Every structure is written in C-alpha cells, then in structure tokens.
Image (cartoon, helix red, strand yellow):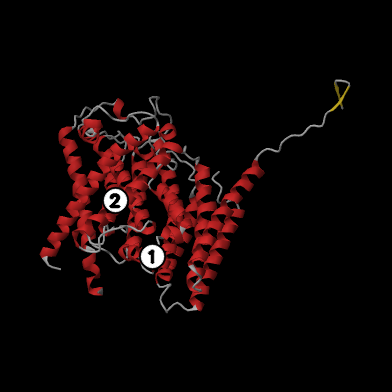
Amino acid sequence: MHGDYFNDYTAVLIASVAGVVLVLTAFVGSLLLSPRARSALKDIPYECGIEPVGDQWSQMHFRYYPFAILFLIFDVEAVFLFPWAVVFLSPFLTSAIFYEMLIFIGILGFGLLYSWKKGVLDWR
Amino acid sequence: MTWADVGWLVLSVGLFLGFISFVVLFLTYAERKFIGRIQQRLGPMRTGPFGLLQPVADAIKLLSKEDLVPGRADRFLFWIAPLIVFVPAIVIWVSIPFTRDIVIENLELGIFFVLAVMGLSIAGILMAGWSSFNKYAMLGAVRAAAQLISYELPLLVAVLGVVMIAGSLDLQVIVAEQNTVWYIVLQPVAFLLFFTAGLAEVGRTPFDIPMAESELIGGPFVEYSGMHWSMFFMAEYANTFAIAVLTTLLFLGGWRGPAPATGWGQDVMMAFWFLTKASAVILVIFWIRATIPRLRIDQLMSLAWKVLLPLAFANLVMTAFYLFYGWPDWSIVLLSLGLLMATVYGYYVRRRSRLPRPVTVKLRVRQGRIVG
C-alpha cells in the first residue's frame, strides 16, 4: 500500500505537465495568429483613459496584514485538526485525545474573540 | 509502475482535460443564456442554432487578439502568472472521482489534496496584480489575497465535519459512506459554509470584489488581453465547476441515485446522477450571480471572520460530541438547525440595534394650536 504512495502522484505530475503544455500551446497559438502593433501610447498603464498620476508601484497600506497572521495561526491549526478528524471513529481516539483537542480549539477560539474585541477584525 | 500504466495515465489525463475544456466552454454559454433568461433577455442567439457556437466564436476572437504587455511591466511574471493560476485548476481533477470507476488516480489524501492545490492559485493572482504595473491591478490583487486566505479557513473547517463522519479524506469513501443518508442532512451548517466559502474562493458574485468591474475595472487582470486573459477566465470557470462537483461529492451523495444494481446501466446512471446534481449546483451559483449584489470589502471580511469561522468551529465541536458519545442522528440535525436559527436571530438583533432610534416627539394640541 505505502509502496504505491509515490506512484499515485505520477498522475499529478502528468497532469501538471499536461496543464503547462496546454497553456504554452495556447500562448504560441496566439503568438502566431494575433496581430502586433506596438506604440508608446499602448505602454501606458490603463486607467480608464485618463493619464496615470504618480508611480504605479507606489506604497500602499496593506490592511490585511493582521488577517494574514491570524490566517497563519488557524491554517496551522487546520493541519493539526485533519489527522484528528480522520482517526476520529477509530478506537485509538480516547477521551483524553478528544478533550485535548477541544481545549486546543477553545484556546484558539479565545484568541479569535480577543482579536475581535481588540478590533483587529475590522477592515479600516 | 510500468510504461503501459503511464500510457494509460497520460490517456486518461488527456480525456479529462478534453472534458474539462468542453465543460468550461459550455459553462460560459450556459451562464450567459441562463442569466439572460432571468433578466428577460434571450442571451446569445446569432452564432449557430440558439447561439450554441458562441463559445467557439469567443475562442477564435481571443486567439486572434493582440496579446499586450504594458511597457514597464515585469515581463517574466506577467507571462507566467496565467500558468500559475491555470495549472492548479487542472491538477485538482486528478483526484476528483466522477463515478465509482471514473477517476484518474484516487489519492488517499483526496479532499485535502484538492483544497491544498486549489490554494496555490493565490500566488498566481498576486503575481498578475504586481507585475501589471497598474494601481488597480495591485489593489485588486491585494484584495484577492485577503479574500482568498480569509475564506479558506471556513472552507477547511467545514470539510472537517464531513471528514469526521466519513472517517476518511478519500472522496470515494466519503461518497460510499453516504449510502443511508446524504451529508447535507447531517451537516447542513457545513454545507452552507462550504458553498458560501467556495463561492468566495473562486471569486464569483457576490464575492467578486477583487475583479469588481465597476470599481476596479477587472482587478488583477486589467492589463491582460487575448490568450493570457482567457487562461484566467478558463481557470475561474474550471474552479467554479470544481466547487459544484465537490459540493455534490461531499454533501449531495455524489453519484448515488436510483440505478440498476449491476452492468453498464449502473455506470451510466451513476454518471447521470453525478452530472445532474453538479449541474443543479452550478445553476444555483448562476442564479446567485443574477440575484445578489456585490458585498463591500469590510462586509466581506467581517462575514468570513465574525460569522463563518465561529459557525464552522461550532459545527466542528457539535459534530465531535455527536460522534464521540454516539448521540442519535436526529440530535445533530436539530442542533444544526438550532445553530442556524440562532445565527439568523443574532443577525436581526444586531441589525436592529444598529438602526437609528425612532424619534418620538410629544406634542400637545390645545384649541387647534401646538403648544409645548
């Protein structure tokens, strides 16, 4: 069973290669078929027809930075939760493991409540 | 694994690719037709009978359109971004079963693999937004990243409930376990969460804030045209189909339905039920697009973090207790419905508390004149 583990992923490799080939074929096809007429005006960033103001790669405020950190925490938690959920019905799951995970979820839920109270979850 | 096996794999991957491309082309047509009908229009009618050749015409038009790269764009990232978005949309189909027998390679990790690979497309969208050298593209990409990571959590935790009941990540096992009752009955909260978060993951209306045409003129894809743009477009439709298919597999019993017990009739009926259910989910997605207006960005983030995520964890804990203590099936159904009703009630209470207070003025009228 476990010897087949990497063999199973041969299909994933083949599908990735097929996807890349498909995209590249489409690009090459459009390279051959599409017209090309470069001009200085076409190089300007598109802003609904008005002339762009300022630098396009200017600094801007990424408001989702706290969200990203929260996401990281909860995503790591999901990694812990998946094995727990898969073996849930098997006899290995004693009540100790069951309640441990509930405590873990409880701590994280408290963390979410805390950040909510602190106003981190408001997009300002 | 012999070369013959590899040959079979290549053949089946090719067939699946062909099928997915066909579905994507058909979905673009079906969406325009269906939304047209909802808005009392006919939709495309000119190309072929009932406009059936519209997707072909679109493909030819996109293929022969100039593939423009903005002057100061990061050319390499600009070229490669559609690839990064499109390839995961293809790779997930490796482990999605269509019937009991039709699947390229049923991985043991199943749903976990699919969700993990789907998440990769965030990188492609960010690259597209950054490399375009356009303010709107950048803004759209940042919003897309915020939205996709926020809605990934409810999606994962909602799937956990199903995984716990089925005891496996394998999609075929999950469908096989639904032989007595579909999981939409046992996990209605998880179903709603998965469907909502799934819509947000593929950026469909009402969650199309990153692409919002009327405010961001197409978000990360502003500067894209021709084939590059159509790759993003195809990936979006392939992912929409994937969400519909996953909803079918996880909650609607997959290919289960009245079918003969043996023979080729069984396989045909399985494929029929599977495609029927998936199409029904797709039509609901189109219906939502025609009906519900776009959310605002702060509403979007609060929905994910303040409503969906707590609900998902409540559902997880509820399901855990139900399974661990072997409560009867009706208890989890009642608990789920109670949770949903409490959520709706909480929403109304909160909304009423935020409305402006009605102003009451006491007037005393004496002999037809207002006094005091």
Q: Is residue B201 in view from this perspective?
A: yes
Q: Position of residue A18 (x, y in %)?
A: 19, 52
Q: Nearer the viewer, residue B245 or B62?
A: B245
Q: Amino acid at mark 2?
A: Leu
Residue at horizontal 38%, vertical 25%? A49
Discs 2 and 1 lie in a common subunit: yes
The circle on residue B180 is 1
Find the residue positioned furthest to the top: B368
Find the residue positioned furthest to the left: B4
Whichever of callouts 2 and 1 sits on the residue coming sooner in the sequence is 1
Residue at horizontal 41%, vertical 65%? A79
Q: Position of residue B247 (x, y in %)?
A: 37, 54
Badge 2 is on which residue?
Answer: B275
Q: Nearer the viewer, residue B232 or B16?
A: B16
Q: Position of residue B165 (x, y in %)?
A: 42, 67
| Chain containing mark 1 | B
Please state, as top left, top right, bottom left or bottom right, where the N terminus of chain B lies in the image. bottom left
Identify the image quadrant of residue B115.
bottom left
Q: Is residue B61 in view from this perspective?
A: no
Q: Nearer the viewer, residue B236 or B96?
A: B96
> In the rendered view, does A15 fall on the left or right side of B340?
left
Identify the image quadrant of residue B97.
bottom left
Between label 2 and label 1, give the one nearer the viewer: 1
Q: Amino acid at mark 1?
A: Thr
Element marked by disc 1? loop
Vertical order, B64 against A101 (above or below): above
Could you classify mark 2 by the number of other residues whose Cα lies within 10 Å: few (under 14), some (14-19), or many (20 or more)? some
